Image (cartoon, coloured by chain):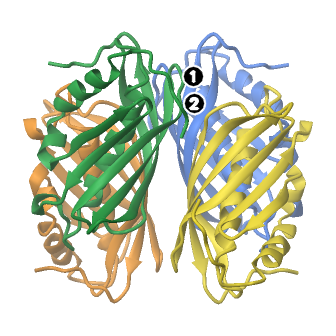
Chain colours: A blue, B yellow, C green, D orange
Amino acid sequence: MAQFQPRDPEYAARVHASFALQHAMELIGARLMVVEPGFTEIHLPLKPEITQQHGYIHGGVVGMIADSAAGYAANTLTAADASVLTVEYKLNLVAPADGQHLVARGEVIKPGRTLIITRAEVFAIRDERSTLCAIMQQTIMVMHGKKERTA
Amino acid sequence: MAQFQPRDPEYAARVHASFALQHAMELIGARLMVVEPGFTEIHLPLKPEITQQHGYIHGGVVGMIADSAAGYAANTLTAADASVLTVEYKLNLVAPADGQHLVARGEVIKPGRTLIITRAEVFAIRDERSTLCAIMQQTIMVMHGKKERTA
Amino acid sequence: MAQFQPRDPEYAARVHASFALQHAMELIGARLMVVEPGFTEIHLPLKPEITQQHGYIHGGVVGMIADSAAGYAANTLTAADASVLTVEYKLNLVAPADGQHLVARGEVIKPGRTLIITRAEVFAIRDERSTLCAIMQQTIMVMHGKKERTA
Amino acid sequence: MAQFQPRDPEYAARVHASFALQHAMELIGARLMVVEPGFTEIHLPLKPEITQQHGYIHGGVVGMIADSAAGYAANTLTAADASVLTVEYKLNLVAPADGQHLVARGEVIKPGRTLIITRAEVFAIRDERSTLCAIMQQTIMVMHGKKERTA
């Protein structure tokens, strides 16, 4: 993985504060566990409310944490007074999300002033075995001078 | 829009029964409102629990209803003893999901025996004005002889 | 299809001049046949040099004309002193490109100051029958003040 | 990168024979340089015929070699009597293809009986410096019992 130098020394606190305001992440039970320059990790425990008809975690929920993990990976590299938004992403669901919890890892592939290109991988963890269940490729836009709402 | 002839005369009941088992759809408050051959419509009222940090409906939630609307559009065209799963999708978020409710419309573009290609559009409705907020292109796989769990 | 008002009254001449400089389009034999606000059409006659191992037009060549048709559709809506570049696209190949010629239609879905979201469809024409062979969803970036090279 | 065990011991000869029949690859000057289980590499020297209006290699041509490198990576893992076709791909162009030649590396991420999920990266090489210029995520379908035409 590439090494990135964050512009904002307070990037981790800023990203955690933004995540804390995302009610949708709280609704599904997602937690932001790792925040490093150009990288984040989101964990999601299985609960019945987030399943689909076969009892696995819903593909849409898999997409939510992949999108967020990669978007916040981009956000770690922006200036303090910038915010990010998802332009688009493409998600392949490669195995059922059959785990006691999911781990989404987002990373920056190519940082740019206006656009940041990222990738994410989601793993289903069951009894300490990890299975790749989704991969994502994403485009993030940086909004300069539009600080994230943090309270 | 293309006209499709469903193989299963009970397609609508089958699709509604499958949707009813998706706890994740219930969690976010999504409702399956229209089910026609090759087409479905999902409605989602705004509630604080599904928002992001700016108060709009979360992009991941927009993706969830787009994915489901298009996936169920494909499901209307399968045989009674087949189920579907999302192989992949690509979503562009083209405007904030700033509405009192969202409407996701999924439609089949190209039906095939093994793969069905679909599209979805999501609109944000505010005071009777409708704004396109997302477009999606999706690949669905048909699992023959693997009936959807419906109870 | 949406109606768009071009900012540059000379958009058609500008787009044709840019297309004429794309040696890769000449190499495959592609011709820009229709240029309207937010819409273009590219035609491509079959020739052995652009086929794949089964004798159909190569999927990569299908992607080239889809990408160009949609990118130039975006370009019709920019100011005279702006250029465009493809950020990304997603292409589904839904049928073999089995035709005496191909027609790619690109259209703008959502114009924006920095990003323009487009779609394209490619049809294979054989004996006056038209078959949809590819659909594409694309993100275009506008480079303000960076005029296209036109000579 | 994952380690894969090919089913067909003659996979490399089979893949080279298929590539040799792709006239479109010959037209642009692409060469298949590396064929390993789940991995291929395609090289493409710069020539004026494959450029766009700024003199860089055309984004559509970048997409062609990315698509082919990843598709043939999938093809290395199929049985001898199977062929592959591209269902869809998503390509981000992250930098201009500004090089004396391009290198596309395709790799299998998740092999399956019916679908194989792959990724590709394309690098522009100039004076021994390598710059990432495109990333791709792709879905390949396996056609069992439909041997590739090889002559």
**Residue at 40 percent of width and 34 percent of height:** C73
Which image quadrant: the C terminus of chain C?
Answer: top left
**Residue at 16 percent of width and 65 percent of height:** D22
Question: Label 2 crowding class (10 Å Cα cut-off): few <14, some 14-19, many 20+?
Answer: many
Amino acid at pointer 1? Val
Specify the farthest residue to the front.
Answer: C128
Taking D139 as reference, is B9 above or below it?
Answer: below
Q: Position of residue B62 (x, y in %)?
A: 72, 45
Q: Position of residue D11 (x, y in %)?
A: 23, 78
Q: Nearer the viewer, residue A28 or B45?
A: B45
Tell me if residue D1 can be seen: no
The local secondary structure at tag 1 comes to: strand
Q: Chain for mark 1? A: A
Taking D28 as reference, is D113 above or below it?
Answer: below
Question: Label 1 crowding class (10 Å Cα cut-off): few <14, some 14-19, many 20+?
Answer: many
Give the left or right position of residue D34, taking residue C36 as reference.
left
| Mark 2 / mark 1, whichever is N-terminal | 2
> Which residue corresponds to mark 2?
A74
Taking A87 as reference, is A145 above or below it?
Answer: above
Total label count? 2
Taking A101 as reference, is C140 above or below it?
Answer: above
Amino acid at pointer 2? Ala
Q: Chain for mark 2? A: A
**Marks 2 and 1 in Cβ contact (< 8 Å):** yes
Q: Position of residue D18 (x, y in %)?
A: 18, 72
Q: Nearer the viewer, residue B50 or D52?
A: D52
Question: Mark 2 to mark 1: distance in Å?
Answer: 9 Å
> Which residue corresponds to mark 1?
A142
Q: Position of residue B36 (x, y in %)?
A: 73, 68
The image quadrant of residue D133 is top left
